[in-house]
């Protein structure tokens, strides 16, 4: 019933290594950029700017960087930001769920459009669900 | 200089953690696919998908998207629509579902490795996608 060959293991391992490499290319630079942001005080400026809105989702102001990098770039960039900020688990949880629903918009919206769904429609549904779920978790999570 | 180092180390440590999860996972996935488990999975999940108006053919792209990612799922849909295997309405329902819930294994594991709870990453995403697809199914008129 279950057949395992060396070829399958090798193919899978190669796919895993490829993913890890793609990941490293984004996660490491993002972590460095965010670390620079933090050291230069730029992060504080961004944090202060967005703090009032992030509170709506039960998040601290600095997580705005995580959401932006996830929404516009991809989840790996968001992971890099999370690593550089050393966020508390609850904020990691809330941002992860928000980003799961809505991410990599610059790449994925055109893909959805190709599969026959209007761009604006998919954008609104993804961002709307993400923000609604963030608000809900901010209220529900202790 | 120390700032750059700090960022570099944090990033690399994160990549290491994720690699420990992603590589074994991809091996498992490859074995599962080679053994035809994707078709079996499709038969199991096709029942809840009937509620949102998807045939077994219509559910397949969603299963592909959930396991492998949006690009793969979209590829299957484009192919299905061209061959007339799924209707435009079905394509809209699947498009909605898979835009919200795709690459569930990879996305979930990345954030799980960073410390977010597993179920919280999976359940709300599936629920929201299902609910939205249901609404689209109910609101879109059947085509002539």
Image: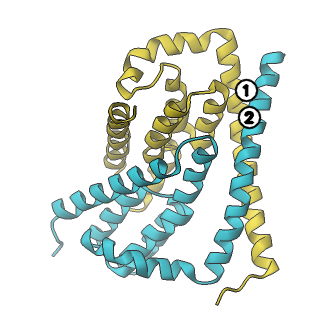
Chain colours: A yellow, B cyan
Q: Secondary structure at mark 1?
A: helix
Farthest residue in the bottom direction?
Answer: A1
Looking at the image, residue B73 sits to the left or right of residue B144; the answer is: right
Query: Can residue B100 be seen?
Result: no
Q: CA distance from mark 2 to mark 1?
A: 7 Å
Query: Can residue A132 be seen?
Result: yes
Chain under numbered label 1: A
State the image quarter where residue A17 is shown: bottom right
Residue drawn at point x = 37 percent, y = 80 percent: B56
Chain under numbered label 2: B
State the image coordinates of residue A99 (x, y, percent, origin top left).
48, 41
| Label 2 with label 1: CB-CB less than 8 Å | yes
Q: Secondary structure at mark 2?
A: helix
- In front: A63, or A142? A142
**Residue B101, above or below B50:** above
Residue drawn at point x = 41 percent, y = 23 percent: A54
Structural crowding at the residue carrying mark 1, measured as other residues with C-alpha within 10 Å and reported as few (<14), some (14–19) or many (≥20)? many
State the image coordinates of residue A62 (x, y, percent, origin top left).
53, 20
User: Residue at label 2?
Assistant: B11
User: Residue at label 1?
Assistant: A32
């Amino acid at each position: 019933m279950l057949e395992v060959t060396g070829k399958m293991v090798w193919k899978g391992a190669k796919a895993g290594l490829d993913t890890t490499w793609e990941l490293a290319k984004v996660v490491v630079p993002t972590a460095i950029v965010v670390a620079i942001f933090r050291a230069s005080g730029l992060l504080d400026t961004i944090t202060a700017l967005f703090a009032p809105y992030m509170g709506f989702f039960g998040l601290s102001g600095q997580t705005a960087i995580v959401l932006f990098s996830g929404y516009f770039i991809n989840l790996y960039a968001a992971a890099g930001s999370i690593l550089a900020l050393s966020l508390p688990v609850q904020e990691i949880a809330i941002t992860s769920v928000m980003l799961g629903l809505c991410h990599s918009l610059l790449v994925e919206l055109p893909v959805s459009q190709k599969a026959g769904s209007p761009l604006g429609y998919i954008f609104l549904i993804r961002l709307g669900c993400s923000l609604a779920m963030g608000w809900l978790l901010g209220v529900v999570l202790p | 200089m120390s700032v750059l180092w700090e960022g570099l180390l944090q990033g690399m440590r994160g990549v290491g953690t994720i690699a420990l999860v992603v590589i074994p996972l991809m091996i498992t996935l490859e074995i599962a696919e080679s053994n035809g488990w994707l078709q079996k999975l499709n038969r199991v999940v096709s029942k809840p998908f009937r509620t949102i108006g998807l045939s077994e053919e219509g559910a397949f792209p969603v299963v592909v998207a959930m396991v492998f990612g949006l690009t793969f799922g979209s590829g299957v849909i484009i192919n299905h629509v061209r061959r007339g295997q799924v209707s435009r309405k079905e394509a809209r329902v699947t498009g909605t579902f898979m835009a919200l819930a795709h690459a569930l294994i990879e996305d979930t594991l990345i954030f799980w490795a960073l410390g977010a709870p597993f179920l919280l990453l999976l359940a709300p995403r599936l629920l929201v996608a299902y609910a939205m697809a249901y609404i689209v199914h109910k609101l879109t008129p059947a085509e002539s």
